[in-house]
Image: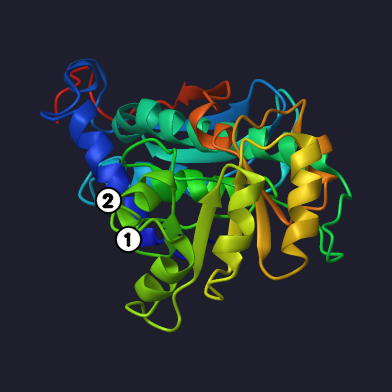
Amino acid sequence: MTAAYTPQVLRAVVDRALAEDAPFGDLTSDAFVPATARARAVVRAREACVVACGDVVAAVMTACSDPASPAGAVRVTDVVPDGERLAPGDVLAVVEGPARAVLRGERVALNLLARAVAVATRTAAYVAAVGDAVSASGRPVRVVDTRKTTPGLRALEKHAVTCGGGFNHRYSLSDAVMVKDNHLAALLGADGEVTSALRAAAARLPHTTHLEVEVDRLDQIEPVLASGVVGTLMLDNFSLEDLRAGVALVAGRALVEASGGVTLETIGAIARTGVDLVSVGALTHGAGSVDLGLDMELATSTASADPRP
């Protein structure tokens, strides 16, 4: 589990989603389903996928369950571990408990789960495309995400990236320094000298803060590295030829990250230029949803035909 993806964060996401989906209760289930009815539901994959955030099912169903319900408590079992691969028809989780709770939580659970599983599945494809490529320093090339996430779902989506074999870039603006072209434009307004400007800015940072700088031309590399404060250099929208030249210029003085317009078709060649990292916004912003289903069977109710409590 990634540091930002905690039970507390997951519960907050679930609570917001349920409040949006059923702000005043589930009118249909309350009217048509007896309070004592119990159900057994199976969450299945309808396409090949990689599991992520399987604990979403229990979090949603528990939040929907009333401890005082005459139908008892919700129980979620057989949850497939994160990172496992499923084929169409495979079971991801089994839910047993009050039918009203299962019905109320069904769509929220599937929405959140389908999004996370899609991110993990997409990430796994990018990781597979990189294969066994290694950087100029001999380390395996990492596929990393970005902050191009769905508002409110960043913790889930970034955890899903790791389930697919990828790695997280910074979680937020508070985690690390990334000096991009707009920052440099503001920073260099005075005298236009990047080396001293980076040194001066770095002097105001805590000593534990990692500093990354983005460049979009080869001639920017040396002035940035001459500052002596840069841990990672991002080569943004470089051609393959320029990526190889950039790696040679850096010569191990910083980690080299390739970024910009990376696709499933191009990432393999990019990874073989010697870079250490390839960041891919499409892991999250282009993931869509995986097709998952919840198949439910209602058990015999011990209540009268009147569906009210």
Quadrant in the picture for the N terminus? bottom right
Apparent side of residue 133 relative to residue 101 in the rendered image (left or right): right
Residue 256 position in % (x across, y down): 68, 57
Query: Which residue type carries mark 1?
Result: Gln
Q: Which residue is drawn at 43% across and 84% down?
A: 207
Where residue 36 appears, as percent x and y from the top left, is 28, 33
In which image quadrant can residue 188 be found? bottom left
Of the pair 108 and 208, the residue shown nearer to us: 208
Classify residue 280 as left or right of residue 18: right
Q: Specify the farthest residue to the front.
A: 191
Disc 2 and disc 1 in contact, CB within 8 angstroms: yes
Query: How far, Cα to Cα, is label 2 from label 1?
Result: 6 Å
Query: Which residue carries the number 2 mark?
Result: 12
Q: Judging from the image, what secondary structure is the residue with disc 2 in?
A: helix
The quadrant of the image that shows the C terminus is top left
Q: Furthest residue to the left?
A: 24
Residue drawn at x 38%, y 60% as measured from the top left: 7
Q: Residues within 10 Å of mark 1 (few under 14, many from 20)?
A: few
Tell whether 179 sits left or right of 264: left
Residue drawn at x 51%, y 57% as measured from the top left: 213
Is 227 rendered above or below residue 70? below
The residue labelled by disc 1 is 8
* Residue 66 position in % (x across, y down): 23, 46
Q: Is residue 65 visible?
A: no
Query: Which residue occupies the extreme bottom position in the image?
Result: 207
Q: Which of 182 and 112 is in front in this view?
A: 182
Q: Which residue is drawn at 54% across and 26% down?
A: 286
Q: Is residue 143 left or right of residue 52?
A: right
Kind of residue at disc 2:
Ala
Element at label 1: helix
